[in-house]
Image (cartoon, rainbow, N blue to C red):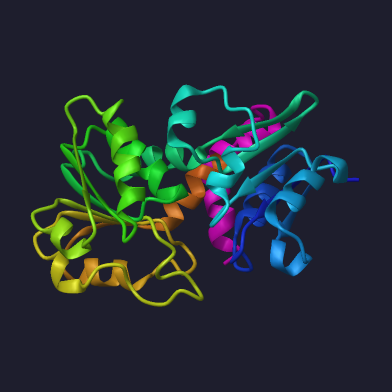
Amino acid sequence: MPDLHLGLIGDNIARSRSPLLHRLAGEQNGMTVQYDRLIPRDLGQEFNAVFDQCPGHGFRGINVTYPYKERAAAKVKVDDPLVRAIGAVNTVLFDADGPKGFNTDYTGFVAAYRATRIDAPGISCLIGTGGVGRALAFGLVALKATEIRLVDRDMAKAEALADDLRAVAGDTRIAAFADATEAARGAQGLLNGTPVGMVGYDGTPLVADAMQGADWAFDAVYTPVDTQFLKDATARGLDIISGYELFFWQGVHAWEHFSGGKPLDRIALRQALEAAQ
Protein backbone atom coordinates (compact mmCIF):
# COMPACT_ATOMS: atom_id res chain seq x y z
CA MET A 1 0.00 0.00 0.00
CA PRO A 2 1.35 3.46 -0.85
CA ASP A 3 1.73 6.12 1.83
CA LEU A 4 -0.26 8.50 -0.37
CA HIS A 5 -2.65 7.62 -3.20
CA LEU A 6 -3.28 10.46 -5.66
CA GLY A 7 -4.56 10.85 -9.20
CA LEU A 8 -5.33 13.15 -12.10
CA ILE A 9 -8.65 13.32 -13.96
CA GLY A 10 -8.47 14.75 -17.46
CA ASP A 11 -8.97 13.97 -21.14
CA ASN A 12 -5.51 14.51 -22.65
CA ILE A 13 -3.07 13.59 -19.91
CA ALA A 14 -0.90 10.79 -21.26
CA ARG A 15 2.14 13.10 -21.21
CA SER A 16 1.36 14.78 -17.89
CA ARG A 17 4.37 14.98 -15.59
CA SER A 18 2.25 15.36 -12.44
CA PRO A 19 2.72 11.68 -11.48
CA LEU A 20 6.49 12.15 -11.54
CA LEU A 21 6.40 15.44 -9.62
CA HIS A 22 4.40 13.96 -6.77
CA ARG A 23 6.41 10.75 -6.64
CA LEU A 24 9.60 12.84 -6.37
CA ALA A 25 8.00 15.02 -3.69
CA GLY A 26 7.15 11.84 -1.80
CA GLU A 27 10.71 10.55 -2.09
CA GLN A 28 11.99 13.74 -0.45
CA ASN A 29 9.81 12.88 2.54
CA GLY A 30 10.48 9.14 2.64
CA MET A 31 6.98 8.39 1.31
CA THR A 32 5.76 6.13 -1.47
CA VAL A 33 3.26 7.94 -3.67
CA GLN A 34 0.95 6.24 -6.15
CA TYR A 35 -0.37 8.75 -8.69
CA ASP A 36 -2.84 7.41 -11.28
CA ARG A 37 -4.00 8.92 -14.56
CA LEU A 38 -7.80 8.73 -14.70
CA ILE A 39 -9.16 9.34 -18.20
CA PRO A 40 -12.96 9.03 -18.18
CA ARG A 41 -13.32 7.90 -21.81
CA ASP A 42 -10.64 5.23 -21.36
CA LEU A 43 -12.43 4.00 -18.24
CA GLY A 44 -15.73 3.95 -20.11
CA GLN A 45 -17.29 6.31 -17.55
CA GLU A 46 -18.45 9.89 -17.21
CA PHE A 47 -16.49 12.38 -15.11
CA ASN A 48 -18.98 12.26 -12.24
CA ALA A 49 -18.66 8.49 -11.90
CA VAL A 50 -14.85 8.58 -11.95
CA PHE A 51 -14.78 11.38 -9.37
CA ASP A 52 -17.34 9.78 -7.06
CA GLN A 53 -15.45 6.46 -6.97
CA CYS A 54 -12.15 8.00 -5.86
CA PRO A 55 -12.72 7.98 -2.07
CA GLY A 56 -13.77 4.34 -2.13
CA HIS A 57 -10.65 3.44 -4.10
CA GLY A 58 -8.39 4.92 -1.45
CA PHE A 59 -7.48 8.23 -3.05
CA ARG A 60 -6.37 10.93 -0.60
CA GLY A 61 -6.73 13.52 -3.30
CA ILE A 62 -6.77 14.23 -7.01
CA ASN A 63 -5.80 16.91 -9.45
CA VAL A 64 -8.35 17.86 -12.10
CA THR A 65 -7.48 19.23 -15.51
CA TYR A 66 -9.11 20.12 -18.84
CA PRO A 67 -12.02 19.98 -19.37
CA TYR A 68 -13.36 19.18 -15.89
CA LYS A 69 -12.23 21.97 -13.52
CA GLU A 70 -15.53 23.82 -13.47
CA ARG A 71 -17.50 20.58 -13.11
CA ALA A 72 -15.28 19.60 -10.18
CA ALA A 73 -16.00 22.91 -8.45
CA ALA A 74 -19.68 22.00 -8.33
CA LYS A 75 -18.93 18.74 -6.48
CA VAL A 76 -16.76 19.99 -3.62
CA LYS A 77 -16.84 22.25 -0.60
CA VAL A 78 -14.72 25.35 -1.17
CA ASP A 79 -13.77 27.30 1.92
CA ASP A 80 -11.78 30.06 0.20
CA PRO A 81 -14.15 32.77 -1.10
CA LEU A 82 -11.69 33.67 -3.86
CA VAL A 83 -11.68 30.09 -5.17
CA ARG A 84 -15.48 30.11 -5.01
CA ALA A 85 -15.40 33.24 -7.18
CA ILE A 86 -13.01 31.59 -9.64
CA GLY A 87 -15.55 28.79 -9.99
CA ALA A 88 -13.00 26.11 -10.90
CA VAL A 89 -10.83 23.75 -8.87
CA ASN A 90 -7.81 21.73 -9.90
CA THR A 91 -6.99 20.14 -6.53
CA VAL A 92 -9.36 18.04 -4.41
CA LEU A 93 -8.89 16.43 -0.99
CA PHE A 94 -11.17 13.59 0.05
CA ASP A 95 -11.84 14.12 3.74
CA ALA A 96 -14.15 12.18 6.05
CA ASP A 97 -16.72 14.99 5.85
CA GLY A 98 -16.60 15.17 2.05
CA PRO A 99 -14.42 16.46 -0.79
CA LYS A 100 -12.78 19.89 -0.47
CA GLY A 101 -11.60 21.95 -3.44
CA PHE A 102 -8.64 24.25 -4.03
CA ASN A 103 -7.20 26.13 -6.99
CA THR A 104 -3.43 25.92 -7.28
CA ASP A 105 -3.57 27.11 -10.89
CA TYR A 106 -4.32 30.54 -9.43
CA THR A 107 -1.58 30.48 -6.80
CA GLY A 108 0.79 28.71 -9.20
CA PHE A 109 0.39 31.33 -11.92
CA VAL A 110 0.98 34.18 -9.46
CA ALA A 111 4.12 32.42 -8.15
CA ALA A 112 5.39 31.70 -11.68
CA TYR A 113 4.88 35.32 -12.73
CA ARG A 114 6.62 36.74 -9.66
CA ALA A 115 9.54 34.33 -10.09
CA THR A 116 10.03 35.51 -13.68
CA ARG A 117 9.08 39.20 -13.89
CA ILE A 118 9.47 42.28 -11.71
CA ASP A 119 7.11 44.60 -13.57
CA ALA A 120 3.33 44.50 -13.20
CA PRO A 121 1.45 42.79 -16.06
CA GLY A 122 0.11 46.01 -17.61
CA ILE A 123 -2.65 45.60 -20.20
CA SER A 124 -3.15 41.85 -20.52
CA CYS A 125 -4.91 39.93 -23.28
CA LEU A 126 -6.13 36.57 -21.97
CA ILE A 127 -7.38 34.09 -24.57
CA GLY A 128 -9.70 31.47 -23.09
CA THR A 129 -12.13 31.85 -20.20
CA GLY A 130 -12.61 28.22 -19.15
CA GLY A 131 -11.26 26.63 -15.97
CA VAL A 132 -7.60 27.62 -16.26
CA GLY A 133 -8.51 30.93 -17.91
CA ARG A 134 -10.60 31.89 -14.90
CA ALA A 135 -7.68 31.13 -12.57
CA LEU A 136 -5.31 33.18 -14.72
CA ALA A 137 -7.74 36.11 -14.81
CA PHE A 138 -8.02 36.27 -11.03
CA GLY A 139 -4.24 35.91 -10.87
CA LEU A 140 -3.88 38.97 -13.10
CA VAL A 141 -6.08 40.91 -10.68
CA ALA A 142 -3.83 39.85 -7.79
CA LEU A 143 -0.79 40.95 -9.80
CA LYS A 144 -2.43 44.35 -10.38
CA ALA A 145 -2.82 44.27 -14.14
CA THR A 146 -3.92 47.64 -15.52
CA GLU A 147 -6.52 46.08 -17.79
CA ILE A 148 -7.64 42.52 -18.53
CA ARG A 149 -9.02 41.80 -21.98
CA LEU A 150 -10.90 38.50 -21.97
CA VAL A 151 -11.16 36.66 -25.28
CA ASP A 152 -13.53 33.80 -26.01
CA ARG A 153 -15.55 32.73 -29.02
CA ASP A 154 -18.36 32.20 -26.51
CA MET A 155 -19.03 35.82 -25.58
CA ALA A 156 -21.51 34.85 -22.88
CA LYS A 157 -18.72 32.95 -21.14
CA ALA A 158 -16.32 35.88 -21.42
CA GLU A 159 -18.95 38.35 -20.17
CA ALA A 160 -19.78 36.09 -17.20
CA LEU A 161 -16.11 36.04 -16.16
CA ALA A 162 -15.89 39.79 -16.70
CA ASP A 163 -18.78 40.30 -14.29
CA ASP A 164 -17.14 38.04 -11.70
CA LEU A 165 -13.83 39.88 -12.02
CA ARG A 166 -15.38 43.33 -11.67
CA ALA A 167 -16.57 42.37 -8.19
CA VAL A 168 -12.94 42.06 -7.02
CA ALA A 169 -10.94 44.00 -9.62
CA GLY A 170 -10.57 47.36 -7.90
CA ASP A 171 -8.88 49.72 -10.36
CA THR A 172 -8.23 47.02 -12.97
CA ARG A 173 -10.30 47.59 -16.12
CA ILE A 174 -12.12 44.54 -17.50
CA ALA A 175 -13.33 44.05 -21.08
CA ALA A 176 -14.59 41.12 -23.15
CA PHE A 177 -13.70 40.43 -26.79
CA ALA A 178 -14.60 37.81 -29.37
CA ASP A 179 -11.51 38.48 -31.51
CA ALA A 180 -8.01 37.78 -30.17
CA THR A 181 -6.21 40.00 -32.68
CA GLU A 182 -8.33 42.99 -31.71
CA ALA A 183 -7.83 42.33 -27.99
CA ALA A 184 -4.06 41.98 -28.41
CA ARG A 185 -3.68 45.40 -30.00
CA GLY A 186 -1.71 47.60 -27.58
CA ALA A 187 -1.45 44.90 -24.90
CA GLN A 188 1.73 44.35 -22.90
CA GLY A 189 0.89 40.78 -21.85
CA LEU A 190 -0.44 37.93 -24.01
CA LEU A 191 -1.77 34.79 -22.32
CA ASN A 192 -3.06 31.52 -23.73
CA GLY A 193 -5.58 29.89 -21.41
CA THR A 194 -6.89 27.45 -24.04
CA PRO A 195 -5.72 23.93 -24.92
CA VAL A 196 -4.63 25.12 -28.38
CA GLY A 197 -1.00 24.12 -28.85
CA MET A 198 -1.24 21.05 -26.62
CA VAL A 199 -0.45 17.65 -28.06
CA GLY A 200 -3.56 16.77 -30.02
CA TYR A 201 -4.67 20.42 -30.33
CA ASP A 202 -2.19 21.78 -32.87
CA GLY A 203 -2.00 25.46 -33.74
CA THR A 204 -1.85 28.76 -31.91
CA PRO A 205 -4.62 30.95 -30.47
CA LEU A 206 -3.11 34.18 -31.83
CA VAL A 207 -1.56 35.01 -35.20
CA ALA A 208 2.12 35.89 -34.87
CA ASP A 209 1.81 39.39 -36.30
CA ALA A 210 -0.62 40.34 -33.53
CA MET A 211 2.16 39.88 -30.95
CA GLN A 212 4.22 42.78 -32.22
CA GLY A 213 4.78 45.42 -29.53
CA ALA A 214 3.87 43.25 -26.54
CA ASP A 215 6.30 42.75 -23.64
CA TRP A 216 5.61 39.25 -22.34
CA ALA A 217 3.72 36.06 -23.09
CA PHE A 218 2.47 33.14 -21.04
CA ASP A 219 1.13 29.80 -22.24
CA ALA A 220 -0.73 27.48 -19.85
CA VAL A 221 0.13 24.54 -22.13
CA TYR A 222 3.27 22.63 -21.15
CA THR A 223 3.02 19.49 -23.29
CA PRO A 224 4.92 20.55 -25.30
CA VAL A 225 6.72 23.39 -23.52
CA ASP A 226 7.77 25.04 -26.79
CA THR A 227 4.31 25.73 -28.22
CA GLN A 228 3.90 27.64 -31.46
CA PHE A 229 2.44 30.50 -29.41
CA LEU A 230 5.66 30.81 -27.38
CA LYS A 231 7.89 30.28 -30.42
CA ASP A 232 6.17 33.19 -32.13
CA ALA A 233 6.49 35.32 -29.00
CA THR A 234 10.18 34.49 -28.65
CA ALA A 235 10.81 35.42 -32.29
CA ARG A 236 9.34 38.85 -31.57
CA GLY A 237 11.48 39.45 -28.49
CA LEU A 238 8.85 38.97 -25.79
CA ASP A 239 9.71 37.74 -22.31
CA ILE A 240 8.42 34.19 -21.93
CA ILE A 241 6.71 32.41 -19.04
CA SER A 242 6.17 28.82 -20.11
CA GLY A 243 3.42 26.49 -19.03
CA TYR A 244 6.10 24.38 -17.36
CA GLU A 245 6.40 27.09 -14.68
CA LEU A 246 2.67 26.88 -14.00
CA PHE A 247 2.92 23.08 -13.90
CA PHE A 248 5.77 23.26 -11.40
CA TRP A 249 4.23 25.80 -9.02
CA GLN A 250 0.68 24.42 -9.09
CA GLY A 251 2.19 21.01 -8.32
CA VAL A 252 4.23 22.35 -5.41
CA HIS A 253 1.14 24.01 -3.97
CA ALA A 254 -1.01 20.90 -4.56
CA TRP A 255 1.58 18.81 -2.72
CA GLU A 256 1.18 21.08 0.30
CA HIS A 257 -2.53 20.21 0.37
CA PHE A 258 -2.10 16.50 -0.34
CA SER A 259 0.69 15.94 2.18
CA GLY A 260 -0.62 18.16 4.97
CA GLY A 261 2.23 20.62 4.53
CA LYS A 262 5.23 18.30 4.39
CA PRO A 263 8.35 20.22 3.33
CA LEU A 264 9.81 20.36 -0.16
CA ASP A 265 13.26 21.31 -1.38
CA ARG A 266 11.97 23.10 -4.47
CA ILE A 267 15.38 23.50 -6.08
CA ALA A 268 16.10 19.79 -5.71
CA LEU A 269 12.61 18.92 -6.99
CA ARG A 270 13.11 21.06 -10.09
CA GLN A 271 16.51 19.48 -10.73
CA ALA A 272 15.12 15.97 -10.34
CA LEU A 273 12.29 16.72 -12.77
CA GLU A 274 14.71 18.11 -15.33
CA ALA A 275 17.06 15.13 -14.92
CA ALA A 276 14.16 12.77 -15.62
CA GLN A 277 13.28 14.38 -18.96
Q: Which residue lies furthest to the front in this view?
A: 156
Question: Which residue is depicted at the point 48% across and 31% down?
Answer: 83
Does 136 appear above or below 141?
Answer: below
The answer to which quarter of the image holds residue 191 is bottom left
The answer to which quarter of the image holds residue 110 is top left
Direction from residue 127 to residue 267 in the image, left or right: right
Q: In which quarter of the image is the N terminus?
A: top right
Q: Position of residue 215 (x, y in %)?
A: 15, 54
Direction from residue 211 to residue 251 in the image, left or right: right
Question: Which residue is depicted at the point 25% across and 43% down?
Answer: 117
Task: Decide whether residue 26 is among the magenta residues.
Answer: no
Task: Decide whether residue 258 is among the magenta residues.
Answer: yes
Question: Which residue is depicted at the point 23% across and 66% down?
Answer: 233
Q: Where is residue 3 in the image (x, y as percent from the top left)?
A: 83, 40
Question: Which residue is depicted at the point 59% across and 38% down?
Answer: 74
Q: How many numbered marks appear? A: 0
Q: Position of residue 162 (x, y in %)?
A: 28, 40
Q: In which quarter of the image is the C terminus?
A: bottom right
Direction from residue 213 to residue 268 in the image, left or right: right
Does 62 appear above or below 141?
Answer: below
Direction from residue 243 to residue 27 in the image, left or right: right
Does 99 appear above or below 213?
Answer: above
Residue 39 at least partly seen:
no
Q: Where is residue 115 in the image (x, y as percent from the top left)?
A: 34, 41
Decide whether the magenta segment is chiefly helix, strand or loop.
helix
Magenta extent: 253-277
Residue nearest the viewer, comparing 275 with 256: 256
Residue 187 at least partly seen:
yes
The answer to which quarter of the image holds residue 238 is bottom left
